[in-house]
Amino acid sequence: MTIPGHRRLALAIAIAGSLSMGAARAQEAAGAAQEPYVDRIISPQQLQPLPPEDDETADDTGLPRSFRIEAVASRNEYGDDSFDEQGLSIGGFRETASWGAFSLDATVFHSDRRRFNGLGANDGDIGGLATLWQRNLYLGNGWRVDNGLGVLNTPAPPLQRSQYRFFLPTVAFAGASSEWHSAGNGLLLQGGFGRAGVYTGTRVVGFDVADGNVAALGAQWQWAPQWTGAASFLGTHGRIVPDDLGEPVFEPGDTQALYAAAAWQGERDRAQFNVLGSDGDPGSATGAWIDIDSVRGRYRHNFGAYRLGQGLAWGALPINNDVEGGYYRIGYQYGRWNWNAGLDGIHSLSGDGFDGLYASGYVRYQASSTLGYGGSLNLRDAMDTSHSLQLFLDKQTGWGQTRVQVDEASSGGRSDSWQVSLDQAFPLRQGTRLSASIAHGSLHYDDDIDATTTTTLALYGGRELTDRLTVDGSARWTHGNGSEAFRGTDLNIGLNWRVTPRWSLSAAFYQSRGSRRSPFILDPLVTGTPFISLPRNRSVFLTLRYELSAGRPQGVIGGAPGGPTGTVAGSLFLDDNGDGVRGASEQAAANVTVLLDGRFAVRTDSLGNFEFPRVAAGSHTLTVVPDNLPLPWFVAPGDAQRTVQVRVRQATRVDIGARRQP
């Protein structure tokens, strides 16, 4: 092919231009490679000064330590009774180089309330409590000691606390306790002795000492590579019963009880054998139970058998007794599926309790990242056949997390009770939280009483109004149209103002009135759901708080001084629907102890919230001690002790739901 002359000229010019540009770029690159690299750093004199931090004035000398003091004034109304309380609360901790960590929690208050505590009338006087702990005192030969003095709870070996089917409660007492750990052979020795009593007070917690002693001894040891044994003794004078207003009081009565257990731990299986005997004023009784846990692939099996004699006791609180039977549970969790099922065969030894079968099942399927649904079914076959059914749907939308739930319960083959509920957690900007709940249903408990319709509305939320001012609160209104309908109102509002880095002012208002009943409960060991008419309860609190932290550079919980820190916060609540998410209508669990790494303790407030500030970044263990959790609520072993990951300058939130006994 022949190219015309003018085109040949244009092509030659283009080639020459390309060659010249390439040569120029190569020359520039060679020159740039010869120039030395210089960091382009902004001069410190040109940087803007950082804003002052709140803790710049802290004392960074010495080991970590903290101190707090609170002054509280309150006005309270309980039924026709009105009274005032004024109190002072002091607490803190101090790390030492050779004697472990010391922590103090003390209160003193004055109340003009007249009450009857089982020992006689109390016209109102000065009360309070004090608890001093010395933890992680290291001795020779691998021994570590924890000592407590003041108002404590009876110690218990880990095998006694980690029960799958039955719970043995602790007893509050004023005295001393000690716990010795050996790292070499896993030996644990513990003991406690003091005077029994009950907690008192409203905003400031006190302790009324009863006219009786409490003694506790316990031990746990590993006597073979896969075998662990434990034994404990508890002797108490008196037992806790509710008074006319539903408050706990002590009444006379002696009880001595002895518990022993042996546990075998394999690679995929675990078995624990338990025996219990008690003797006292209620009579003598014995009991035994076995729990077995087995993991096979994606399935977990739990099964066991039990026989608990009539009048069996442990301490001051009632426990399951007059029953024998067996149970089986199976659970599966993988991918999008989560389901479990169980069967109990139960027989009353005296013939006065429950006899029959109890079956339960739960299933949840996560269809997508924003949609999940499932349900649960409970069947009880005794004198008549009863069941309860629950269906739910969880949906994540632009409006937040939504749950729609339908409950239905029947007895004798006819539909007696039903309820439809809607829970909504709204996605708001950082520092604002809000959830709402609405429920409507018809409740029928007795053939002699007409069914009642009940409606419930609830709100729960909070907002950071400014950097120093926050507000939290919850409200619930329930109304039914029958003589024994579930009805009442609850209002709980708290305002916190951080005046300075060390001073803060808090105000709270709480009001509750109406009647209480827990619907849709089919419990094989508790066949009735009592109706309780409660008097009006109204309280107003004002709290002035001072906090001081010092050390190098700050007191860091669970880590080396000066290391990176975050915050662990959360709430403990009564999880009515068992979904693990706090709904607006679900009650808070107040005044319950929460431990971080087994060393640092706080109590939940009236909204069920707790917080550990300045926690070392990394992995930590969060433990719930159900010392003041109301029966029949309990915290499942998987929730009672959790591993949390704390990230630098971030808040890790953990919401823990207490459940009813299955």
Image: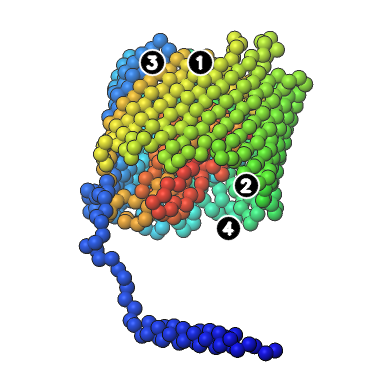
Tell me which label, 1 or 4, sits earlier in the chain: 4
Mark 2 vs mark 4: in front: 2
Q: Amino acid at mark 3?
A: Glu
Secondary structure beneath dot 2 equals loop
Q: Are marks 1 and 2 in contact (CB under 8 Å)?
A: no
Q: Are marks 3 and 4 in contact (CB under 8 Å)?
A: no
Q: Position of residue 494 (x, y in %)?
A: 38, 29
Q: Position of residue 650 (x, y in %)?
A: 41, 49
Instruction: Tell me the residue at 69%/24% (across/down).
Output: 409
Q: Would you name the residue on which mark 2 appears?
A: 369
Whole-angstrom CA distance, mark 3 to mark 4, is: 58 Å
Tell me which label, 3 or 2, sits earlier in the chain: 3
Q: Would you name the residue on which mark 1 appears?
A: 514
Q: Mark 1 packing: few (<14 Cα in 10 Å), some, or many (20+)?
A: some
Whole-angstrom CA distance, mark 1 to mark 4, is: 56 Å
Q: Amino acid at mark 2?
A: Ser
Tell me which label, 3 or 4, sits earlier in the chain: 3
Q: Would you name the residue on which mark 4 appears?
A: 225
Mark 3 vs mark 2: in front: 2
Q: Is residue 11 above or below residue 303?
A: below
Q: Residue furthest right?
A: 413
Secondary structure beneath dot 4 equals loop
Locate the C terminus and report the quarter of the image it occupies: top right
Q: Is residue 176 above or below residue 77?
A: below
Whole-angstrom CA distance, mark 3 to mark 2, is: 48 Å
Q: Mark 4 packing: few (<14 Cα in 10 Å), some, or many (20+)?
A: few
Q: Amino acid at mark 1?
A: Gly
Whole-angstrom CA distance, mark 1 to mark 3, is: 14 Å
Q: Is residue 313 left or right of residue 127?
A: right
Tell me which label, 2 or 4, sits earlier in the chain: 4
Tell me which label, 1 or 3, sits earlier in the chain: 3
Q: Would you name the residue on which mark 3 appears?
A: 77
